[in-house]
Amino acid sequence: MTFGSLSHPRLHHLWQGAGLLFILSASLGMADCGQSSPLSESSLAQQAYLKASNTGAGDHFGHAVALDGDTLVVGAWDEDSGSSGINGNQSDNSGNDIGAVYVFVRSGGIWTQQAYLKASNPDDIDTFGTSVAISGNTIVVGAQGEDSNAIGSNGNQSDNSVAQAGAAYVFVRSGTTWTQQAYLKSSTAGFNNFGNSVAIDGNTIAIGAEGEDSASAGINGSETGTGAPSSGAVYVFTRSGTTWSQQAYIKSSNSQSGDQFGNSVALNNDTLAVGAVGEDSAATGIGGNQGDNSASGSGAVYVFIRSGSTWTQQAYVKASNSTANSSFGGSLSLDSNTLAVGTDNASTAYVFTRSAGAWTQEALLQGANTENGDQFGISVAVHGDTLAVGASGEDSAATGINGDGANNSASDSGALYVFTRSGTTWTQRDYIKASNGEAGDSFGSAIAVNNGTIAGGTPFEDSNATGVGGNQADNSAADSGAVYIFQ
């Protein structure tokens, strides 16, 4: 499976406020806050500073990240080269926001770039690398701006008659060689933003299409019609041999215009979580009243489970203090019975657990120095008893691990917070800053966690370095982006 963070597109520009994180997990009742200051010393250290092999201003390398074992996938959705396929010409910047994905591998603690991935049908504004996910030797890449009129799996890529339809691309690795295995589209062509979020676990892929317009609700309803603009949908594909086919078309149980269901997705085994940042109900907690739309943009998360090939909705999850415009569900991460959910306009984290199919609240969390505008929760990643939370708008001028978070002289430099769980209690262990953090870098916009390794995406970092361990101080490539690895 993938352990990472799938951010909503352009969140740096769209979201204001401190941000709110929720964790859905399995224990009983509400625990105490479990909040603590960061430790003065940490077991974490920065292992690598990664840049694209063809660093360019405005590429936003690190907009999306995903990590599985010793393989890291990085999306740069505004990269401009016109090459296609695997390891093509990186220096041809004749395009505009076509997008690229970079694969790095680790051996003996050393990271190297293994592949440079492009779409098989690159075009301007496709934003290939909007979202990324990895499971073993399979990568899925979303391109929410792709324009073809194709539907289903491996259709005609060349008919660009449907703007912003979106697409997803599947790549597989044999040895050290990557090849494209599939080109996936929604089952109905339209302005869907298909691929704005992706998740993969084994032979199952979930793809969000937050701009999908049908008025249906629930599982496998009518996919036609435009009666509910931007209500959103999620498409589940499964692989048999090397062939991918659509297994399910999923809508929320209370689907309405503007809900943006599918803006985030997370997948683990037979459980799927879907965020809907525009959902409007004033319900709180688990299984509340979905029909009271008096809290515009409060947001919701829906949990689905699969038995055989059949999906059903298991839970409807809201913030316990649901308020208008909080955008609950902006980011998600799922590991077994623990689900982390990020949102906007608050500074609290909630923890729930699942036991015998029921989700209950476990704890509330908060960053030790979180302030209004920090966007705490813009990204989340959970693995086992470790949770990382991004705060891309955090302002301190600290660098490295557990520095002084009180000096707010580096606006929007960004930070990561690491929490660990003991029993049912979560505590903040680490406060992480980039080694060359500066104002406007937005460190923590995307994060991934796996087996003690943390990757933090910083899409607005400015250095002109290339590859691994380059010069961090040359800020001549504005918004080129970087990724930092901590171990």
Image: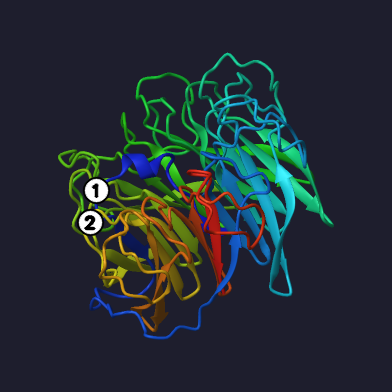
Q: Quadrant of residue 141?
A: top right
Q: Nearer the viewer, residue 119 or 409?
A: 409
* Numbered disc 2: secondary structure: loop
**Residue 362: percent from left, percent from top:** 31, 72
- CA gap, disc 1 and disc 2: 7 Å
The three-letter code of the residue at mark 2 reads: Ala
Q: Image check: 464 left or right of 432? A: right
- Residue at (58%, 24%) from the top-left corner? 124
Q: Label 1: how many residues lie within 10 Å, few (<14), some (14-19) or many (20+)?
A: many
For the residues bearing labels 1 and 2, Cβ distance under 8 angstroms = yes
Q: Image check: 124 left or right of 176? A: left
Residue 438 seen in this snapshot: yes
**On the rendered image, what quadrant is the C terminus found in?**
bottom right
**Residue 121: percent from left, percent from top:** 69, 27
Which disc, if any, is residue 296?
none
**Residue 485: percent from left, percent from top:** 56, 66
Q: Which residue is mark 1?
A: 326
**On the rendered image, what quadrant is the N terminus found in?**
bottom right
- Residue at (65%, 25%) from the top-left corner? 94
Residue 201 seen in this snapshot: no
Q: Which residue is mark 2?
A: 346
* Numbered disc 1: secondary structure: loop
Q: Nearer the viewer, residue 255 or 333?
A: 333
- Residue at (50%, 73%) from the top-left corner? 384
